[in-house]
Amino acid sequence: MNAEPPRPLLSMRGVVKRFGGVQALRGVDFDLRRGEIHALLGENGAGKSTLMNILSGVIEPDGGEMRIEGVATRFSDPRAAQAAGVATIFQELDLVPGLDVTANLFLGREPTRAGVLDRGAMRRAARERLAAVGADIDVDQPVGELSVGRRQMVAVAKALTYASRILVMDEPTAALTAAEVDRLFGVMREIAARGVGIVYISHRLEEVPRVADRVTVLRDGLVAGVAPASAPQSELVRLLVGRPLAELYPKRGAQAGETVLKLERARFAPRRGRAGWQAPDDVSLEVRAGEIVGLAGIMGAGRTELLTALYGAAGPGRWSGVVQIEGRPARLASIRAARGDGVGLVTDDRRGSGLLLRDSVGRNLVLTVLERVSPFFLMSRAKESTLARQAIQAFDVRPPQPEAIVGALSGGNQQKVVLAKEVLGEPRLLLLDEPTRGVDVGAKGEIYARIRTLAERGLGVLIASSEMPELLGLCDRVVVLRKGRTVAEFAGGADEHAVLAAAEQSEDTSP
Amino acid sequence: ASLVKDCGKDGKYVIGFSQANNAEPYRQHVNDELTAAAAKVPQFSLQIADGAGNVNTQTSQMDNFITQKVDLILISPFEAAPLTPVVARAVKAGIPVIELDRRSLGEPGKDYTAFIGGDNFKIAQEAGKYVAGTLLPDGGEVAVLEGLPSSTPAVERLNGFKDGVKANAKIEVVAEQAADWLPDKAQTAFAAMLQAHPNIKAVYASNDMMAAGARLAAKGAGKKDGDIKILGTDGLPGPAGGIRAVAEGEWSATFTYPTGGPEAIDMAKAILIDCAEKVPTVVTVATTAITPDNAKAMMGK
Amino acid sequence: MNDAAPMRAAPAAPPATARRFDAFAIAVRFQSVIGLILVTLGGIVFSPRRHGHILFLAPDNMANIVRAVSETGIIAVGMTFVIITAGIDLSVGALLSLCSVLTATIMTSGGYGLAPTILFVLACGTAFGGAQGLISNRFRLEPFIVTLAGLQVARGLALVISGNQYINISYGQGPGLAPPVFAILGDRLFDNTVPVATLVFVVVAAIATFTLNFTRFGRYVFAVGGNERAARLSGVPVSLVKVSVYAITGLVSGIAGVVHAGQFNFGSANDGTGYELTAIASVVIGGTSLFGGSGSMIGTVAGAVMLGALANILQLNNVNAALQLLATGAIIVLAAVLQSLVRRREGLGR
Amino acid sequence: MNDAAPMRAAPAAPPATARRFDAFAIAVRFQSVIGLILVTLGGIVFSPRRHGHILFLAPDNMANIVRAVSETGIIAVGMTFVIITAGIDLSVGALLSLCSVLTATIMTSGGYGLAPTILFVLACGTAFGGAQGLISNRFRLEPFIVTLAGLQVARGLALVISGNQYINISYGQGPGLAPPVFAILGDRLFDNTVPVATLVFVVVAAIATFTLNFTRFGRYVFAVGGNERAARLSGVPVSLVKVSVYAITGLVSGIAGVVHAGQFNFGSANDGTGYELTAIASVVIGGTSLFGGSGSMIGTVAGAVMLGALANILQLNNVNAALQLLATGAIIVLAAVLQSLVRRREGLGR
Ligand SMILES: Nc1ncnc2c1ncn2[C@@H]1O[C@H](COP(=O)(O)OP(=O)(O)OP(=O)(O)O)[C@@H](O)[C@H]1O
Ligand SMILES: Nc1ncnc2c1ncn2[C@@H]1O[C@H](COP(=O)(O)OP(=O)(O)OP(=O)(O)O)[C@@H](O)[C@H]1O
Ligand SMILES: [Mg+2]
Ligand SMILES: [Mg+2]
């Protein structure tokens, strides 16, 4: 195993993939050696998951070739990839919530005896596998009842069992605590030592030198560079972003106006608790007009939950503490009440809850202002089209036709539509959840500029994001959330490590 | 003057038959009889349209016959009242209409040419009298299996039977359940009736298929043929029909509900070929009681 | 904002492909209209002739077709709203029957006058439909199961109200008689050519087309079906819309029930059986997706008429009932497959 | 790995709430069993009595109930697989009819012997169902619309094959006569107590329960319904599973068709109307969600028997058809509401 053969374990050459209007991969070369842990980096939407989905047989490439141990290979479905010893932990976990942990661990490869499921053997093996990754999880519990972190560990345990040649891990640490991450890295090293090649995708740059051997950076569907994991972080950032950060982020605005949102020891108790739903629990923060405030935190910290609850979209429940909008107690019982208070929300899931994908850009844009364009309930096509064209121009949506079908637009342009739609509603407090998720670098810059412009016009903006550079580069202040509580506050441009430390602090004591 | 202008021996005549609902076995029997009778007249060609148990569909089929200007229309209305307007429309368009089985609400000879058929109330009444007088002279408990509730024949047959058994004060109708003309529903319903009233001596089924279901229920309750007097209605021929069931002793009786098919074709011949100036406007065809006495003989027919 | 025009001239290449793509999409969007044209052509070719006249095209044959589909058409128009929200309503046929029984009963016993009777019946239909919507929305139940239960309840009520009898409507003045003007629903106007039932269908369809395409409510319906969560987050009153569409199917079932009673002078608990499936088929053939979010009212109307024309041409040629069933089944699948091809082409999968 | 036990003992607090929660969930999971017990209690209370005996509980009354539900029960058992994958099959009643016609026709004309005839009919049913699954899967069509078309096609075929006649089955030796042993399907065994049709139902239900709970295929069915994407990524042959469940409903419809022909000694193109709705109602009452991903075969069996027991007690008391419809509708909604309450409690919402 020491003598590295001339052929790499995996070699992908000139891989191309297109989704509708989005060119996800434009000819990517990627190599993986035996026993190597290879970090795959790139901003949101760079094409990392797409490349790995091709390797795992989830999607087929439009062009390019793939060789495993020198043999040209093409997987038509995930089963074929698994049979070839390629195991994957998908970014959207491949778990069935209604089935228990054991059933999930063996899904697709259940051991049987005389055609009958061998439940005893499965449960025993399930315990072993979970113990091997250091997870203490009841094997009989339905996966839907587990927290996000525990689900992640189940997915890891599941993939490890049949990773005989290649293991792909798409952001496995995003929902894990520091202790869990340490344990996971230990497991990864063990597996690599057995000669398995591991592709490791993460947004946490500081993890790279701790675990990886080499790094490939993707940018906009192209390889921006390959480097040893020991390369300085600044070098990696340059590869990731492709230009100095200063150009990406607009200049900060100077004067902040009156307080738009004020939370003091605010707490939201939902009437019906949900597994994995971190309710806001002791939140204190302030957003003033003209200000962009960031919300930092690890996955599952409750950022999305805070924004949804502020938008009246978290279902029935009770607020306590001080929750004021423009100095008055906020009415957040329903979305319509919150909107009446001037609150707007851009969701983190534009395809799932942001857009009518099969409808046109114009009809999507006016969704928030239907009352305005339909006096006496009759749609005014003229008003509608005027507003839509204004919004399209203001946000530079391409193509600029209101008739274009939204689902066919690129991710960045879809995101602009979601943002423009919300802005048309003329909110005074704009809540943005992951506003640049899955958007290419160019579009990111445009979106940042638009957000800053909105703030300059007097909006208060609250942004939740998993991209630390984005928060620190764009925001005037950054508030850190942990388990539903605000734990720290930093000024814009603060040190990334300090913010991260605050977000992750003392997580390992939790079960 | 003759009833239709273009009548005569040499013509070719299209007769349209608007059937109420092919899904009832009795209706297929009507179709068969009509087809057989029409086949004997070389000038006639018969078109059958299925109203599928839906007054709207049947109305539209009548409309189609009018559009096609068929020479004569036969109709078995699914329900009488709803088909009344379209029948009148056909007559107004100069097409003679002979109604089978159910009479529409107009005036015979004016709003429709003639009616040929039996009488649901009477046939069930006769069944009732047969039970009261012949089968159970000493009285006892009896049950009724009704057809699709609120449909004309179901209502009339139910009422007719109950009227008929009044002839014997010692007879008590202890249960009546709707089985929608279907054998499977009849089996289930009659099984429950037998459970609740083990002394039931006779059951009147408003059609033959329900009688077949009732027999299966009786068999399931451990009764032998004849323990419970089963009466059907329609008197369908063929291996699946009631005549055979009576002949083989499975049932006690069934009452033919005459199709009027041969009579209708005869009348059509009179109108179209013989250029009749007048036809009888109401022809009631008598029902025949099929009992063990005559069943074997009837089977041959 | 008038300087938007020159900007749009810039990207020259994309529109070309976009237009080609659109031609296909539009073709399928109006598949039912095209299907109707095809069936009409087929009708002309295969129609029996009499004295050289094409029977299929005879004005009274056309009138026959549109009359025959008027009741299911009225229902299909309402069903279109429900299906665009990705719902379904199986209770419509039974509700038609209930409303026809109500109409007949009140007409022949109440003597409350024509308009109050009709309004009352329509209110009952609307309330019944709305109640189903409320239950399904409040408890998050699949509309399939709620309206399946509603079907049974409506038929049961119809039987109870009619006392297990069919109810004839007789016309005239006095107790137990309905106002003679009500019988107009079974007539044909304008020189005996235009069935009044069809006129009702046309009016209902026109109002529905307008509502779907030109009002705020119509937009809400599309939004709820297109992406319920996005609609909710955009401030659309989703629950209200979802309840309303079932109230609409209730209302149109009521209208169809009144038309039924007026056309046939009759109310019966057994009528309207299977209308729900015909109505749903019309909607789907008309290009509205059962997945919700897209659909066309004109398509539904064309779909309903197409099914009627197909049945008509088969009947004119004396094709038997079995083959009619086979043909209808085949047409439904064909229409659905066409739609799915578009969905794929749009690259939107499901 | 036997040291796992102490590890699990650690978190003391959560299990307590978890257990309390489970009691409710289990209660609703087996709602149909509980419902069956309630209906049984109601039956006992409201049953007519004779010489102090409760008629409802009489063994032959029990036999009547289970016989009456056997055909729809057999179908419901197959439908459970389909519904767990979040699908639906409306064609089952028509397919039963087609298969009963096939059985009767071949029995009385072919003379191929009992087993080959039955196997051929079952193969036809399976192929018909599988074809619907293939079309729906290949073109990504809603199963609702595909099986709606399938319903029409199956009835059309049955009409063509039977010539719209009741095909009577006569028993005996020789051409045109069916082997007498086939009539056993209408009999009751063991001292005239156990209907053979019920035995078939029991066997089918037992095999289905085993398949759903103890085989890999059963797991796949749950996985496909629970999260199709995850199932696909885990290497579950999703398309194959989806086609298979429709082949299964086709197979059970075939079995029910053979049983129907054997029980009634005839095959008819008009039987089985509405069976699909009864079967779906049984499944839903049995606690299987139309949203897919969860369900119980025992629940389905209990649901089917419960509907039969409800009809029986109403019929024993000579309650009229209208009230029977109302009661059935109410029960269906009630069962569905119960389920939705659990879904919410589990926080799985939609
Ligand atoms: N199924 C799909 N349909 C349409 N577009 C897609 C699809 N999957 C990915 N894309 C688009 O392809 C591009 C690359 O996406 P991909 O998921 O590979 O990015 P990524 O590097 O994994 O990003 P992230 O860090 O957010 O996971 C994005 O613009 C995304 O919107
Ligand atoms: N009820 C749920 N069922 C399944 N997955 C869930 C559920 N709730 C949240 N998740 C998943 O868990 C992850 C984290 O949840 P969420 O986004 O709400 O947390 P957050 O604190 O906002 O973190 P982030 O914004 O970084 O994702 C998301 O990927 C989300 O899809
Ligand atoms: Mg990714
Ligand atoms: Mg989030």
Image (cartoon, coloured by chain):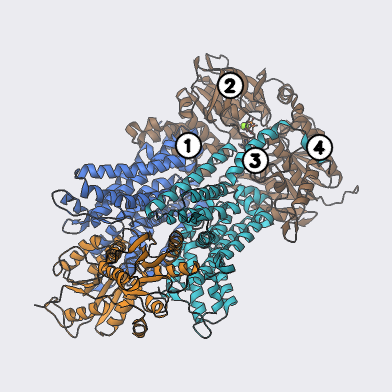
Chain colours: A brown, B orange, C blue, D cyan
Residues marked 1 and 2, same chain: no
Residues marked 3 and 4, same chain: no
Write the residue at 79% across / 55% down: A70
| Residue closer to the observer: C147 or C64 | C147
User: Residue A237 location, x and y as percent?
Assistant: 72, 31
What number is the disc on residue C231? 1
What number is the disc on residue D211? none
* Tag 4 subunit: D
Q: Is residue A187 above or below residue B218?
A: above
Cα distance, mark 3 to mark 4? 24 Å
Choose mark 1 or mark 2, whichever is in front. 1
Residues marked 3 and 2, same chain: yes
Residues under numbered marks 1 and 2 in contact, where contact means CB atoms less than 8 Å apart: no
Choose mark 3 or mark 4, whichever is in front. 4
Cα distance, mark 2 to mark 4? 50 Å
User: Residue B301 location, x and y as percent?
Assistant: 33, 84
User: Residue A500 location, x and y as percent?
Assistant: 72, 25
Residue that mark 2 sits on: A292
- The crowd level at tag 4 (other Cα within 10 Å; few <14, some 14-19, many 20+) is few
Q: At label 2, which amino acid type do we have?
A: Ile
Q: Quadrant of ligand 3?
A: top right
- The crowd level at tag 2 (other Cα within 10 Å; few <14, some 14-19, many 20+) is many
Write the residue at 36% across / 71% down: B232
Residues marked 2 and 4, same chain: no
What number is the disc on residue A144? 3
User: Residue D267 location, x and y as percent?
Assistant: 46, 72
Residue that mark 4 sits on: D6
